[in-house]
Image (cartoon, rainbow, N blue to C red):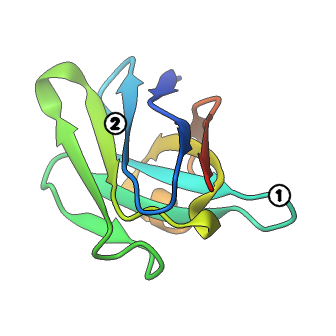
Amino acid sequence: HVQLVESGGGSVQAGGSLRLSCEASSYPYCMGWFRQAPGKEREGVAAIATGTGRTYYADSVKDRFTISQDNAKNMVYLQMNSLKPEDTGMYFCAADFCNLLVAGVPSHWGLGTQVTVS
């Protein structure tokens, strides 16, 4: 079991920025972020293959969000710029093999951190 702990959520005005962090108890093959807004389905936001650094992004966040990693610290970050009200939701860190993460069915999840944009 991989334990994941998110931090960095909060409330910001439209156009502002936030950086989310996720610390893993062990280093998985792939890590990423999902989000869920009230009344909407959960959606994948971004992912990174920890071995190669390859990244994946949802079309809705391309050119605004950047996922990165610190291998020595078992951490992944999500830099969110030019935030919009539609970015509001609960953001969850997830980990598993990359094929499962990209498919939306990772086995390991954090408890989430709230992001509110007004």
Dot 2: what SS?
loop
Left or right for 81, reference 85: left
In which quadrant of the rendered view does residue 43 lie? bottom right
Identify the residue at image location x=45%, y=62%.
83
Instruction: Give the camera-side residue of 21 and 2.
Output: 21
In the rendered image, which quarter is residue 73 located in? top left
> As displayed, is residue 24 above or below residue 9?
above
Q: Amino acid at mark 1?
A: Pro
Whether residue 7 sits left or right of residue 28 in the image: it is right
Please state which amino acid type lies under the numbered disc 2.
Answer: Pro
Q: Position of residue 67 (x, y in %)?
A: 28, 53
Residue behind mark 2: 28
Q: Is residue 2 among what the camera can see?
A: no
Q: Percent from the top left, x then y, of residue 103?
A: 54, 68
Secondary-structure class at tag 1: loop
Q: Which of label 1 and label 2 is nearer to you?
A: 1
* Residue name at image x 57 percent, y 62 percent: 87
Quadrant occupied by the C terminus: bottom right
Position of residue 49 relative to residue 76, above or below, is below
Q: Nearer the viewer, residue 13 or 87?
A: 13
Give percent across and percent down for residue 3: 51, 21
Q: Is residue 43 visible?
A: yes
10 Å crowding of disc 2: few (<14), some (14-19), many (20+): some
Name the residue furthest right.
39
Pointer 1: residues within 10 angstroms few (<14), some, or many (20+)?
few
Q: Which mark is residue 65?
A: none
Q: Residue at x 40, y 54 (%)?
A: 16
Mark 1 → mark 2, Cα distance in angstroms:
29 Å
Query: Mark 1 sits on what residue?
Result: 38
Nearer to the camera, 40 or 85: 85
